Amino acid sequence: MKKIATPEYDIKEKLKCHATALATAAKEVVAPLSVTTQYPRERRKWPDCFRGYILFDPERCISCFECSFVCPANAIWMKEAKSGRYYPTLDYGKCIFCHFCIDSCPGGALKTTKIHDVSYTTMDEMFTDTEEMIAPPEIIREDEGYVEYEIDRDDLTLKRTKGQDNLIVDVAPSQGVPMVSVCVDSGSCIACKICEKVCESGAVSWALDDVKDVIRMAIDSETCTGCGLCVKECSMQILRLVRK
Amino acid sequence: MLGLPVINNLIALLLWESFFVLIIMPGFAVLGTLLLILPWIERKMVGRMQWRVGPREISPRTRGIIQLLADSLRFLFQEVIIHKDAHKRYFLQFPFLYFIPVLLPLLFINAGTAGSPLVPIVSDYGLQLMVALICLMPVFILGLGWASNNRFAFIGTVREAFLYFAYEIPFIVAVFAMVVMYGTSNSVGVVDAQAGGLWGIILNPIAALTFFIAALMATARLPFDIPEADQEVSFGPFVEFSGIAFGLAYVMGYEKMYVLSALMTMLFLGGGSGPMIPGLGEVSYLIWFVLKTLIVMIVVVNLRGVYPRYRLDQGMKIGWNAMLILALVAVAWSLVIGAII
Ligand code: SF4
Ligand code: SF4
């Protein structure tokens, strides 16, 4: 059996350790490094993947409800717009900033920003309507510069740059994994044609099967964008999204 | 002045040497100023060691120097809560009573130099009296902890008691070594014996080291802040104090540190000896004395940024083992060196 014991130092080594500790402290007092960002007078430059306030682009939304399904905090509630389409609203009182919604959005309608300092006076205010999610919120910016942390081997330095960091992230919306909708049980299809109605890209078509005298639905895998609308709406729940 | 006889008398009283030394410098006035500034110095320097900034937001242009003033105002206006299990009378009295053993040693501190002593009370038993008063301080902390009637306070108090015995004996022996060395326990004689730059720290560095470590333990500074350890017993004996009572408890440690640093300056750093500053006369000795004391205090507070805390058993081991041996060696050293000189 191996026994683990504290390392034994002789008196010479101990004195050396004390001297090194005191010398390091003295050095830091004279010429200290610093890791403090003087927020709000300066901001830290966050990476583009920072999980901050969420912006919404209605042009890209296909009303797939994916965001509200995936949200672990139940913060997204779909609201019917005048056009009859459903768009997400977001309750920041519940949101835990996991950004699952952004990752799951097939159309790239949701996107992150580096804004993390929005304040509200009431809980009701934290409920953010679809319209309010389109433009970035109004924040007071006192920062005159931004700070970047640079780590070289074992030391860390702050690099200060004058000017304001752009808090709106300019990333191309994710293309996601190309998916396509397929029917897994065509025998159960009742030909309600809902999928054809909801499909925005016209990928679903139908034809009369003369032999059996039934209507057969078909999904064109080339035109299907894999948005999943039909999967959600299918009365018999026999459609599935699979990788293209 | 203004034809008022009282003012003349007042000024005469203030400038009366013994009174000036006790009340103004290095006595109460300087102590009060240091109490306001030292925690700031401590927080700033330890902050720099740890790559932080330290106090800043209150008056950023002066780098937050009035932080402690703001803190004291907060202490002043906070409610003092006395919980119902506390021994109310002692709970409130001890923080005030504590000032007696802390401030009385200042009566015997000699801030002058060889030939021109600046001491409020000259006594042949000055050192003994100071040591006795300093050894009285932990009793009040034990009282505080007992009156708090709180489990953390009890644990902290017992730790304080353990540590008290561990450092007290080496502390007294170290002072004794210097008494042997100088051949006197009169604070005037002690400073006179260090004339010509032959300071106690050169004559007997072992005693100086022992005294310094004992001072660290006595003031419960890191690495020996075992009784107060805020992460373990959340400020130990002071855990129940709030408002102005906590403010008093908070400055207690610093007052004690001031007294011990002043004693260290007198015993080992030649008192107020230093080059005369032209035009100031004897006040220049006082300035040197306060400067040396301040340097000792800064070293003491800055160890906080260097060392982690010892466990209680390790602290006791250091006290009963290494320090006691060091103190005894210091006495032997004093006997040998004293014989040579
Ligand atoms: S970030 Fe997470 S918690 Fe917030 S709305 Fe999106 S999915 Fe929900
Ligand atoms: S996941 Fe994207 S596309 Fe689907 S409803 Fe939400 S925002 Fe619209």
Image (spheres, rainbow, N blue to C red):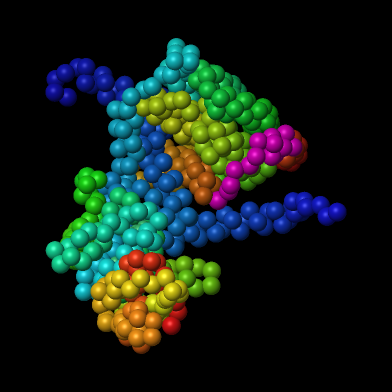
Secondary structure mainly formed by the magenta segment: helix
Q: Identify the residue at horizontal 28%, vertical 56% (top origin).
A: A77
Coordinates of residue A218 in the picture (x, y in percent): 36, 82
| B73 up-or-down from A83: above or below | above
Q: Is residue A12 left or right of residue A91?
A: right
Q: Nearer the viewer, residue A151 or B288?
A: A151
Q: Nearer the viewer, residue B6 or B152?
A: B152
Coordinates of residue A88 in the picture (x, y in percent): 26, 62
Q: Identify the residue at horizontal 78%, vertical 52% (top origin).
A: A4
Specify the quadrant that holds the N terminus of chain B: top left
Magenta span of residues: B306-321
Q: Identify the residue at horizontal 57%, vertical 54% (top origin).
A: A22
Ligand 2's quadrant is: bottom left
Q: Is residue B236 magenta?
A: no
Specify the quadrant that holds the C terminus of chain B: top right
Q: Is residue A33 left or right of residue B204?
A: left
| A56 up-or-down from A1: above or below | below
Coordinates of residue A216 in the picture (x, y in percent): 35, 80
Q: Nearer the viewer, residue A99 or B200?
A: A99
Q: Identify the residue at horizontal 44%, vertical 63% (top origin).
A: A33
Q: Is residue A233 visible?
A: yes
Query: Could you say which quadrant of the image residue A142 lies in?
Result: bottom left
